[in-house]
Amino acid sequence: MSATVHNVEAQAAAGEQELTDGFHLVIDALKLNGIATIYGVPGIPITDLGRMAQEAGIRVISLRHEQNAGNAAAIAGFLTKKPGVCLTVSAPGFLNGLTALANATTNCFPMILISGSSEREVVDLQQGDYEEMDQLAIAKPLCKAAFRVLHAADIGIGVARAIRAAVSGRPGGVYLDLPAKLLSQVMTAEAGRKSLVSVIDPAPAQIPAPAAVRRALDVLKGAKRPLIILGKGAAYAQADEEIRALVERSGIPFLPMSMAKGLLPDTHPLCAGAARSTALKDSDVVMLIGARLNWLLSHGKGKTWGEPGSKRFIQIDIEPKEMDSNVEIAAPVVGDIGSCVSALIEGMGGNWPAPPADWTNAVKTKKDENIAKMAPRLMKNTAPMDFHGALGALRAVIKERPEAILVNEGANTLDLARGVIDMYRPRKRLDVGTWGVMGIGMGFAIAAAIETGKPVLAVAGDSAFGFSGMEVETICRYKLPVCVVVFNNNGIYRGTDVNPSGGTDPATTAFVKDARYDRMMEAFGGAGAHVTTPDELKRAVDAAMDSGRPTLVNAVIDPAAGSESGRIGNLNPQSVVKKKQGSMQ
Ligand code: ADP
Ligand code: TZD
Ligand code: MG
């Protein structure tokens, strides 16, 4: 024990000083900065931290696995623009949370993973402590910033740095390492209070340079076939009115990326969602707002984008390094989306010319054509259901409840739902994001319900659901208004594959046939439903959404209906040998 602590305790024993400790300082620092909810899994050395946080009025949500707790925290960050906090134990708990932290960083969601860790002295000499691991070193390459606090007096600064790092500039994941010993370090309460830091203006506005705004407007003015692409950065920015004004004042068709759906309604006259291929291929100037030219946009080149050299890009992003990451950006506008879009609107003035009518009409014609083509497929009321029939029912559920939040994961279940289910309000569609990661479903659903109080519809493939399925217990325990629909096609992509060796093991992509996922929810006191037609599906989901009762609907989908890897089968590498011998598919 250090001399200072000794003195402090001696003074306290003499009744002179009120004391605090690391536990309380962490909680006070979080509360001071408006952190109202923590997602986590208890255990050594943070069990008491969770208990005390709950006692202190923070909502502490205990999940069944740290990856799900981490995903919950990450999406809480996306929904609220405040860092979502995930609390875990050391080594294995930390590692379980790390996938979510890395995923949050990849998706630009602000999140703080706080993990307890073991004795530094023992860890650094690799002497084999309980759950020993050099967590800080492991977290570093996987997140935006990583900090360790060794002295109770530095907890205030540590928490402040973590918060600011998570939300300022491009948001991302931050790791905060709290060694067990720190939590029981003692200080006088007064010194403790003084050591706390209130983070002033954690995500300062970043105003774009006027010249960059003018350049962007010049490029836009010269466009014959302009297109706006809205990404999840635009949804995150909560500049909803400004973005709507930009689109409507410019009259430019817009294309929402998956999680930007609903920023303006998918039914908006300028939405080009149903004419995606035409819009990407034939546009001449593309303005990206909070969207990266990564694989989801074919890196801004190739067949998707039409003739080489046919595009000029304007990019609005808070991260300067994002510019030119894949192709030349003719007009980079670096700043926060609210400030950038406002500056563009101001620069447009009162009489901005509408884009040429032949372009907007071409987009509209294509879109109407595609919508008409899809319509009959969405009304097929057969058993077993195919994806479109089932999704037609869920599309109606969301249309009737535009405030509900849709969580979506799977392959076919994801790709087809994205196209079929229209969204009407900002930040209502949460999905697998930039990595296409399975397992976000239940964590996202839980946090969406907790953070917004709105009903949640989680639509997951049977494989996707399995990655976080145990959290149905958490959903029941906290009585959350979550309706999970499992699209059960007996497997990954399809349920019809057979073992190519002729052996008795099932195919690698096939699951137990006709499983009853609904009974998992029933096991914990929630409602289960087993449906085979779109009409039954609609009735079951309506009932769940209206009652707010935790529900799992097992929706039987034709096991032969899906395609390999949904819409991204082209990303699968092909074996030359396999091809020579005749395809396995
Ligand atoms: P999507 O997957 O929807 O295309 P991405 O995740 O690829 O979207 O892109 C989001 C982009 O938004 C990131 O480049 C990020 O830097 C940017 N971004 C996030 N928040 C803001 C903000 N407030 N202002 C400006 N850019 C932002
Ligand atoms: N593991 C993780 C963490 N993320 C992944 N994306 C995958 C594995 C690979 N994968 C996909 O990309 S989709 C998918 C896996 C396993 C599941 C698809 O099956 P599903 O959906 O039942 O969820 P459909 O409707 O049957 O296509
Ligand atoms: Mg499946």
Image (cartoon, helix red, strand yellow):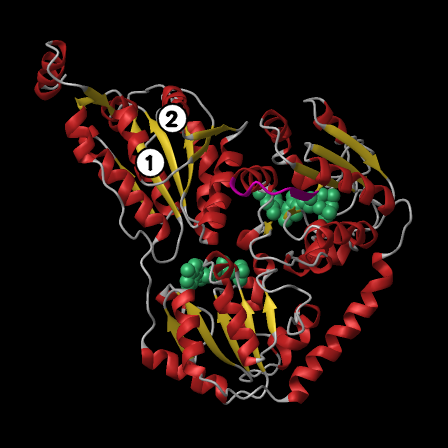
- Above or below, 231 against 150 in this view is below
Q: Secondary structure at mark 1?
A: helix
Q: Position of residue 205 (x, y in %)?
A: 33, 62
Q: Position of residue 585 (x, y in %)?
A: 78, 52
Q: CA distance from mark 1 to mark 2?
A: 9 Å
Q: Which residues are magenta?
A: 451-460
Residue that numbered label 1 is attached to: 30
Q: Residue at x 75, y 79 (%)?
A: 365
Q: Amino acid at mark 1?
A: Leu
Q: Quadrant of residue 329?
A: bottom left
> Is 299 colored magenta in this rendering?
no
Q: Which mark is residue 53?
A: 2
Labelled pair 1, 2 in contact (Cβ < 8 Å): yes
Horizontal side of 14 relative to 543 (left or right) equals left
Q: Quadrant of residue 341?
A: bottom left
Q: Amino acid at mark 2?
A: Ala
Q: Is residue 577 visible?
A: no
Q: Position of residue 77 (x, y in %)?
A: 45, 46
Residue extending furthest toward the top = 14
Q: Residue at x 68, y 88 (%)?
A: 358
Q: Is mark 1 within 8 Å of ligand 1?
A: no
Q: Position of residue 265 (x, y in %)?
A: 64, 63
Quadrant containing the N terminus is top left
Residue extending furthest toward the right = 382
Q: Residue at x 27, y 42 (%)?
A: 160
Q: Residue at x 79, y 74 (%)?
A: 369
Q: Residues within 10 Å of mark 1 (few under 14, many from 20)?
A: many
Horizontal side of 58 relative to 552 (left or right) equals left
Q: Quadrant of residue 188?
A: top left
Q: Residues within 10 Å of mark 2 (few under 14, many from 20)?
A: many
Q: Is residue 2 visible?
A: yes
> Is 459 colored magenta in this rendering?
yes
